[in-house]
Image (tube, rainbow, N blue to C red):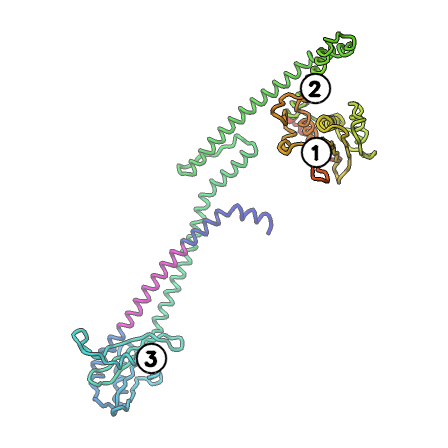
């Protein structure tokens, strides 16, 4: 089944449920009504036909069979049976008498259609049974009847006996006409049921459309709201519950738009404050840096009581300068103004240059093949490597191993130390800004932005950085591992950023 069909089925599931419920309710009501109507009509038709035939048969038995002699001949029985069968009730008659004691004879109106074999044995026993005459039972013999079937045709069989030793009589009436009438009634009720179900389905479609159209509009509006179109509103029509829901949605959307606007304004204000502060700090920091460089050069000739203070000023000035630079870099990422400047970079040479510039050659073990070249931003790659290697040296100690390999279309650089590793509760937060692993040490030598900036620089390349712990053969943690993954060709990302910049979405700082 295609994706489009699956989507339509999923979207119409509520409609389908409404149609099914309407159809089931209509089917249940129609079948119940039809069943009751059929049962009532069936009983009425059969009772009317049955009562008419039995009453006529009883009357004929009293008028004709009762006049027969005590010992009738077979011809007497036959003629009387034929006379009884000529009535309007349209049934066959069979009379059973005795020409002598213990010698029964039978006379039938139509021996080819009705014989003694067609009379149920139980009915014959009931007819021949004489009952005591009492105040509540003035007759020793009663009229009994039974419905039977022959060759698929229903029949009514009735019988009684004349008091005082008279003949027994049985009637045999076909109910084929009544069966045909009831079948016609059943077909009519079935057609009515089908029409009721079809009508209910049409009504369900109309109801579903009426209900689901506003719901669909709400869903589309919510989707647009989720995509950032906060000015999405719906036209309110009517005064029902759906109209109330629409008003609630519009109110929620308006409130959300206002809150997002306020948050954006505050975020923009904070970002501008950080950027302006960073820019304003650069001028005095430049002067301070120049002064500290002079003091550092003259540190050996200073008074031993002053030298530690000078060393602290130099260290803190450099730390403040790094913090300002990091803050400016963060504001560029937040403002969306950071851009890649790609160049063909030999990865091994780039890592070697990064290590050499920071005098880490003796503390870092590099495992990288020569000749791995990729279009990357050298400055941003240097920032990533410096932060990852510096973090490993600071927290894990030397030696730090840096290995380089390629996997399909990716460049993979792993930085591993042999320190105590990263606590499990800290791992999810190592790339968070200003995150401190220990609350008891709010101040540390770093700014808390290094790994965050490294991650941002990896993301702008279309890559990522992951942090984990290395486990030794004995199951103990044997250092932390940071894995940098970058695409071997980031030119597509650069073109995308430049396109957005040309459309006014990105502005160079």
Q: Secondary structure at mark 2?
A: helix
Residue 195: quarter of image: bottom left
The numbered dot on residue 407 is none
Residue located at (43% from left, 54% from top) = 24
Q: Residue furthest left?
A: 135
Position in image of residue 400 (x %, y %)? 76, 30
* Front residue (pair 346, 159): 346
Q: Secondary structure at mark 3?
A: loop
Residue located at (57% from left, 48% from top) = 6
Q: Sequence order check: which comes first, mark 1 or mark 2?
A: 2
Residue 264: quarter of image: top right
Position in image of residue 33 (x %, y %)? 35, 58
Q: Sequence order check: which comes first, mark 1 or mark 3?
A: 3
Q: Quadrant of the C terminus?
A: top right
Question: Which residue in the structure is indicated by mark 2?
Answer: 322
Question: Which residue in the structure is indicated by mark 1?
Answer: 463
Question: Which residue in the structure is indicated by mark 3?
Answer: 120
Q: Is residue 341 visible?
A: no
* Front residue (pair 275, 78): 275
* Gap in angstroms between the C-alphas marked 2 and 3: 115 Å
Position in image of residue 334 (x %, y %)? 63, 25
Is 37 one of the magenta-colored residues?
yes
Q: In this picture, which residue range is highlighted in magenta?
A: 26-51
Q: Are marks 2 and 3 in contact (CB under 8 Å)?
A: no
How packed is label 1: few (under 14 Cα within 10 Å), some, or many (20 or more)?
Answer: some
Residue 137: quarter of image: bottom left
Q: Are marks 1 and 2 in contact (CB under 8 Å)?
A: no
How packed is label 2: few (under 14 Cα within 10 Å), some, or many (20 or more)?
Answer: some
Q: Are marks 1 and 3 in contact (CB under 8 Å)?
A: no
Position in image of residue 70 (x %, y %)? 21, 89
Q: Secondary structure at mark 1?
A: loop
């Amino acid at each position: 089944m295609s994706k489009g069909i699956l989507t339509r089925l999923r979207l119409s599931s509520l409609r389908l449920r409404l149609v099914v419920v309407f159809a089931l309710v209509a089917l249940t009501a129609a079948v119940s009504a039809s069943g009751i109507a059929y049962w009532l009509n069936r009983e009425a038709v059969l009772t009317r036909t049955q009562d008419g035939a039995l009453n006529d048969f009883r009357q004929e038995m009293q008028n004709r069979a009762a006049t027969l002699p005590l010992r009738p001949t077979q011809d007497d029985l036959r003629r009387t049976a034929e006379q009884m069968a000529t009535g309007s009730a349209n049934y066959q008659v069979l009379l059973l008498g005795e020409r002598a004691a213990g010698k029964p004879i039978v006379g039938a109106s139509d021996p080819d259609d009705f014989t003694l074999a067609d009379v149920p044995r139980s009915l014959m026993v009931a007819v021949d049974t004489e009952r005591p005459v009492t105040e509540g039972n003035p007759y020793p013999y009663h009229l009994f009847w039974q419905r039977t079937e022959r060759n698929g045709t229903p029949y009514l069989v009735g019988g009684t006996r004349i008091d005082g030793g008279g003949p027994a009589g049985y009637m045999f009436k076909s109910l084929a006409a009544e069966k045909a009438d009831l079948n016609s009634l059943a077909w009519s009720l079935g057609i009515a049921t089908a029409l009721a179900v079809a009508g209910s389905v049409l009504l369900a479609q109309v109801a579903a459309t009426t209900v689901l159209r506003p719901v669909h509009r709400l869903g589309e509006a919510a989707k647009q709201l989720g995509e950032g179109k906060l000015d999405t509103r719906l036209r309110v029509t009517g005064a029902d519950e759906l109209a109330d829901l629409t008003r609630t949605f519009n109110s929620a959307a308006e409130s959300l738009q206002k809150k997002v606007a306020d948050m954006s304004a505050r975020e923009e204000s904070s970002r501008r404050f950080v950027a302006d502060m960073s820019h304003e700090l650069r001028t005095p920091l430049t002067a301070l840096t120049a002064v500290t460089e002079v003091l550092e050069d003259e540190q050996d000739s200073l008074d031993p009581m002053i030298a530690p203070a000078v060393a602290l000023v130099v260290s803190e000035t450099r730390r403040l300068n790094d913090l300002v630079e990091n803050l400016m870099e963060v504001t560029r990422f937040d403002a969306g103004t950071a851009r890649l400047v790609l160049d063909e970079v030999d990865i091994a040479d780039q890592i070697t240059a990064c290590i050499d510039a920071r005098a880490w050659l003796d503390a870092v073990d590099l495992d990288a093949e020569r000749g791995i070249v990729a279009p990357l931003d050298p400055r941003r790659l240097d920032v990533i490597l410096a932060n990852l290697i510096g973090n490993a040296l600071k927290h894990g100690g030397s030696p730090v191993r840096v290995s380089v390999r390629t996997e399909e279309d990716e460049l993979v650089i792993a930085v591993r130390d042999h320190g105590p590793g990263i606590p499990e509760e800290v791992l999810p937060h190592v790339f968070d800004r200003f995150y401190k692993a220990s609350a008891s040490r709010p101040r540390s030598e770093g700014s808390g932005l290094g790994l965050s900036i490294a991650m941002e620089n990896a993301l702008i390349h279309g890559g990522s950085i992951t942090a984990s712990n290395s486990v030794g053969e004995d199951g103990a943690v044997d250092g932390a591992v940071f894995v940098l993954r970058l695409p071997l060709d980031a030119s597509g990302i650069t073109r995308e950023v430049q396109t957005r910049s040309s459309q006014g979405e990105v502005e160079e700082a």
